[in-house]
Image (cartoon, grey):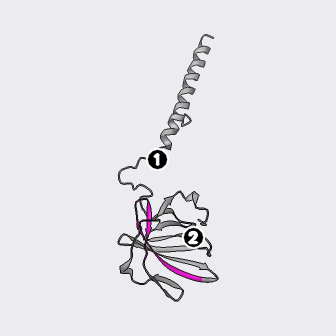
Amino acid sequence: MKCIPFIALAFFIISCQDNKHSGNSEENNAVHKDTSVVKEGEVAQNTDPYQGCFRSVTGRDTLTLHLERKGDQYTGRMHFDNFEKDASQGPVNGTLENGTLHLWYSFDSEGMHSVMEVILKSGDNGLVRAMSPITNRGDTTVFRDPGSLEYPRQNPLLRVDCSELKAIDL
């Protein structure tokens, strides 16, 4: 009978030790939840400045963009929400060439299908869209002189959390 309290105490100590090492303690869970450490040889995610979600607001016009990289190709969706004009939305795809992302935006607007050339460079907090005179070749809008592209820093496409982009069907 003298052994029963000792055995009960031993079971209590063992069960406390099991909870501490079983992964149920908050301290142990905090260690497992920390994914911010990048091991040598690993690449941190989202280091590609062209991947993710972006938004630019100019007056009452909003441009939103979601991009993903698959190998050498970038794909995603773009949406123009223009005040007092027809909106457009559609897929984009393209490649990175010499630090410049060259995309083709395919969309329907005002009852017509169109394709538009879009060129972007990485900026301080997102992407900067190229501007230059354009011309139409059939249903495709392209830059008239690719050598004359300018990258105005006002109204950049700022990086945003993708959950903020409700206009794009991700």
At 40% from the left and 63% from the top, the residue drawn is 123
- In the picture, which quadrant includes the C terminus? bottom right
The image position of residue 18, as x and y in percent, is: 54, 30
In the rendered image of this protein, does residue 92 appear above or below residue 43? below
Circle 2 is placed at which residue position? 79
How busy is the neighbourhood of tag 2: few (under 14 within 10 Å), some, or many (20 plus)?
many
At 48% from the left and 61% from the top, the residue drawn is 158
Query: Which stretch did the figure color magenta?
Result: 113-131
- In the picture, which quadrant includes the N terminus? top right
Q: Which of the numbered marks, if any, corresponds to residue 147?
A: none
At 52% from the left and 39% from the top, the residue drawn is 29
SS of the residue under disc 2: strand
Q: Quadrant of residue 169?
A: bottom right
Real-space Cα separation, disc 1 to disc 2, in angstroms: 33 Å
Q: Is residue 125 magenta?
A: yes
Circle 1 is placed at which residue position? 35
Q: Is residue 100 magenta?
A: no
Question: Which one is in front, 71 or 2?
Answer: 71
The image position of residue 102, as x and y in percent, is: 43, 74
At 61% from the left and 62% from the top, the residue drawn is 166
Q: Residue furthest top?
A: 2
